[in-house]
Amino acid sequence: MKEVTLERKKVNLPIDVLVGTGGVILSVVLSLIPYENTFWYKSAMLAYGLSAIVYLAFLIIRDRILGAVATGVLSVGLVLNLTGMIRRSIESYQMGVFHPPWSNLFEALTFWSFIAGLVYLIIERKYRFKLIGAFVVPLIFFTSAYAIFKANAEIQPLMPALRSYWLYLHVITAFTGYAGFTVAFGGAVAYLIKEYFSGRRIAQILPSKEVLDEITYKSIAIVFPIWTASIILGAAWANEAWGGYWSWDPKEVWSLIVWLFFGAYLHARQLMGWRGKRVAWLVVFGFITVLICFFAVNLYFPGLHSYATE
């Protein structure tokens, strides 16, 4: 398959910075309204769900207004999600147990939704391919919904091992990796639909396979070094907290498996010339290891990261 250079949108940096700053300021202002943090998280979940529906409609109808609405509603969801995160931080401070809003399962899932949505919007803004949103935003919605309906939203004091500046560095890099892999998975699924349903309407309305392959690759290439950094930072934190850089904890092992899977993807694509459905399937199986790393390990395998189930 030939190499494709994606068309990039001319980004007006001052406007982008202004819009982003405005969104942050709006979230701060909204967080001062005395509603519980869960109100904002639930509102964000509803916005993600509506955005997913509109993206799916845009995939079928291809109306420019629908595309703008889908992006706008997703942006609203991100503002509401950030509002919930800020409000939760305020509430934890008022309770005397302040911590950043990504320390337990509920907070981690809602943080994942936020970072995944943000990463996707950056890619959409840069490359002008809204159709991938029909595959990525539903994942963001389901992640948020799982947090709302299945995880414990109660604010609790941090375990001693988590009371460290490493909580900021390690978790942010890890979830940026999760987010990038989520976007790549959406691109890979779209590619496989294009490949196996070539005669169907859904395949015809998707971008070309070359473009989908390239979007998937760029998503992974950007976040793979960040995921690598998260493993290194986690090892440094483990040494400080538990006296060793590596203890073969289930979370550590599966984080390494994720790294090996996506490292193999980059190796196969760049050095072995793999393209198309082979590497798309590699991304799908790689994302399964991501889900195992986060959900299965946290919920079903006891270890040093058991706090993440709370």
Image: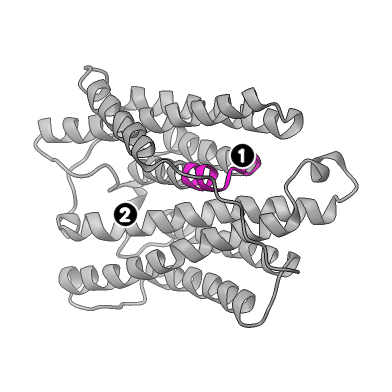
Q: Are marks 2 and 1 in contact (CB under 8 Å)?
A: no
Q: Is residue 275 above or below residue 207?
A: below
- Residue 209 appears in which quarter of the rendering? bottom right
Q: Which residue is mark 2?
A: 172
- Residue 165 appears in which quarter of the rendering? bottom left
Q: Which residues are magenta?
A: 120-134
Mark 2 neighbour class, 10 Å CA radius: few under 14, some 14 to 19, many 20 or more: some
Q: Which residue is mark 1?
A: 130
- Badge 2 element: helix
Name the residue: 49% across, 24% down.
46
Amino acid type of the residue that numbered disc 2 sits on in the rendered structure: Ile
Name the chief secondary structure element in magenta.
helix
Residue 243 x/y as whole percent: 17, 76
Name the residue: 68% across, 30% down.
58
Relative horizontal placement of residue 289, taking residue 39 as reference (left or right): right
Residue 249 x/y as whole percent: 36, 71
Colour scheme of the rendered structure: one colour
| Viewer-nearest residue: 214 or 155 | 214
Mark 1 neighbour class, 10 Å CA radius: few under 14, some 14 to 19, many 20 or more: many
First of labels 2, 1 by sequence position: 1
Quarter of the figure that contains the N terminus:
bottom right
| Viewer-nearest residue: 231 or 307 | 231
Instruction: Report whether residue 42 is seen.
Output: yes
Residue 11 x/y as whole percent: 45, 44
Instruction: Report whether residue 84 is seen.
Output: no
